[in-house]
Image (cartoon, rainbow, N blue to C red):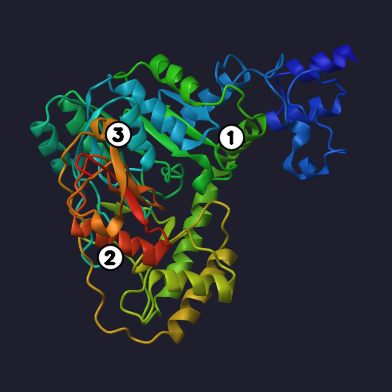
Amino acid sequence: MLDAYREILYNGTMESLLDKLRQYSDSGALAMHMPGHKRNTEDFAWLAPLGARFDITEIDGFDNLNDPQELFARLEERAARLWGAKQSICLVNGSTAGVLAAIRAAVPSGGEILLARNSHKSVYHAAELADAKPHYLLPSADPQTGIFGSVSAAEVAQALDAHPNVRLVAVTSPTYEGVISDVRRIADVCHARGALLFVDEAHGAHLGFGGFPESAVRCGADLVVQSLHKTLPSLTQTAILHVNGERIDPARVRRNTVIFQSSSPSYLLSASIDGCVNYLERQGTAAAERWLAARAEFDRAAESLAHLCIWQGGQTVFAQDPSKIVVFCADADLTGRELAGIFREQFRIEVEMAHECYVVAMTGMGDTAQSLRRFADAVCAIDRTCRKGGLPRPVQPFVLPEKRLSVGEALASPGAFCPLAEAVGQVSGEYVWAYPPGIPVLVPGEVIGEGMLGEAEKLHSDRGQLPKRIFCVGNA
C-alpha cells in the first residue's frame, strides 16, 4: 500500500492534477488533516457533485499554489509559455486578487497612478490600499450608445506629461462591451516616460488564440491580469497574473499575490486551471477558430435585423473583441432592461448585462454553433415583433465630477448620510458603482452634481440600483 501511495504522489508522468487527485482519492489514504468533510460524500451527499472527493489541503506531493516548487511551478511555466509572459502566477481568488497584488507591487505607498476612469472597482480598491494618488483618463464615448471607447496612446502621453510622477498606468482592455485599446502603443508611451503599464484583461484571456486580437501580454504590458473563467473552460474564481519584461521584480509581485490570495487555495480550482491550460496547449487554436466561425454565422443571421442592431464600435474604438455581442435597441421600442427580460422570459436566455439602450451577451469557448444560432434566432424573433421607436434616445456623455478631496481624505472624514435627492453640492464619502460592470459613477472626495443624480436614476431604471441615500462628508 505504501509503495502504491508513494507512486501516486511522486509519479511525474500523470496527465493532469485532476488525474493525480483522482488516484489519490482512490488510494484509500486516511485524511487526518483539513478539510473537515474528510471526502466523506456518503454522509454529506450534497458535496459529491461538487467534487469533494478531490478536495484536499497542502499535503506532501501536491505542492503549494502560494509557494510553487514542483507541480504548480510546472503549471505556471507552461502558462507563461502559452501566453508569452516572463512569469505567470495562478490565482484562485479571481482577477481581483491579481489586480490588488499587481498594483500594490507596482505603486509605492503614496505614489501617483493614472487610471482609466472606466476601470473596475478592484483597481480603485487597489489604489486605495496603496494610498495612491489617482489621476483619471476619461475615454471618449460612442455618441450613439454612450459606451466608453478605447484609451489612446496620445491621451496617455498627454496625461503623463501633465503628471510626470506617475509610475503606473492602468487601463481596461477589453472592456465589458469588448472595446480594445492600442496596448502596444500605450506600452511604448509608458516606457518612454518611465512608467509601468498594467492592463486589466480580465475579459480577454482568450485573446491571441486563433484569429482573436493580440493579448496585452504580447503587446508589451508589464502586468496583465486575466480571468480564466470569463471566456475559457475553467471554474469561476480562477484567474492568472502575468509579469512581463524586466521593469518589475516578479518576486515582489508574487509576494503580493500571497497577501491577497487565500492561504488555503482550493485544489479543485487549481485543477480547473491545470485542465484549462492543458486544453489550450492542445486545442486552443482550433477551439478559438470554431468559436469565431460560430460568431461569424451569428453575424450573418443578424444582417436581417430591422430594428435591433449589433453594435460595431465606431471612431472611438481601436478594436473590438468578437467574443462580446452588444445588441443595441435604442431605435426600437425597447429599453435594454426590457430586452433582457424578453430574452429571459420568452427564450430562456440570460444575457450578461442590460444597459439603458443595449444588452451585452458574452460568448465563450464553451459556446457552439448551435448555441449561437439559438441566440441569433431569438434576436431575430424579437426584432420581428419590435416597432420603430422613433429617433434614438439621446445619450448624455459622462463628465468627470469635481474633485474636492482625495479618496483617502474623504474616507477618513466625518460625515452623515444624506437623502440622494438633497445631496447635490455635497462631497461624497463613498463610491457609487455601476454594477455590472463595476465602474464608479462617483468616487469618494468628488462633488455630487445634478448629472450624477441623472446617472443614478438611469442605473435605477436599468439595474434597480438607485441608492436612497449617500454618505456625505465635510459640511454634510
Is residue 92 visible from the viewing direction of this image? Answer: yes
Type of amino acid at the residue the image marks with label 1: Ile
Residue 297 x/y as whole percent: 48, 68
- Residue at screen point 58% across, 53% down: 366
| Label annotation for residue 273 | 1
| Label annotation for residue 112 | none
Q: Using a 10 Å C-alpha cutoff, classify the residue at mark 2 as few (fewer than 14 neighbours), some (14 to 19) or many (20 or more).
A: many
Type of amino acid at the residue the image marks with label 2: Thr
Q: Using a 10 Å C-alpha cutoff, classify the residue at mark 1 as few (fewer than 14 neighbours), some (14 to 19) or many (20 or more).
A: many
Please tell me which residue lies in front, 379 or 370.
Answer: 379
Judge from the rendering whether residue 409 lies leftward or rightward of residue 40; answer left or right. left
Residue 256 x/y as whole percent: 43, 20
Residue 251 x/y as whole percent: 42, 14
The residue that mark 2 highlights is: 145
Please tell me which residue lies in front, 41 or 363.
Answer: 41
Q: Nearer the viewer, mark 3 or mark 2?
A: 3
Q: CA distance from mark 3 to mark 2?
A: 33 Å
Q: Nearer the viewer, mark 1 or mark 2?
A: 2
Type of amino acid at the residue the image marks with label 3: Leu
Q: Earlier in the sequence, mark 3 or mark 1?
A: 1
The residue that mark 3 highlights is: 411
Q: Name the quarter where the C terminus is drawn.
A: top left
- Vertical position of residue 218 compared to residue 289: above or below: above
- Residue at screen point 29% across, 52% down: 319
Judge from the rendering whether residue 404 lies leftward or rightward of residue 415; answer left or right. left
Q: Using a 10 Å C-alpha cutoff, classify the residue at mark 3 as few (fewer than 14 neighbours), some (14 to 19) or many (20 or more).
A: many
Judge from the rendering whether residue 370 lies leftward or rightward of residue 153; answer left or right. right
Residue 233 x/y as whole percent: 58, 45
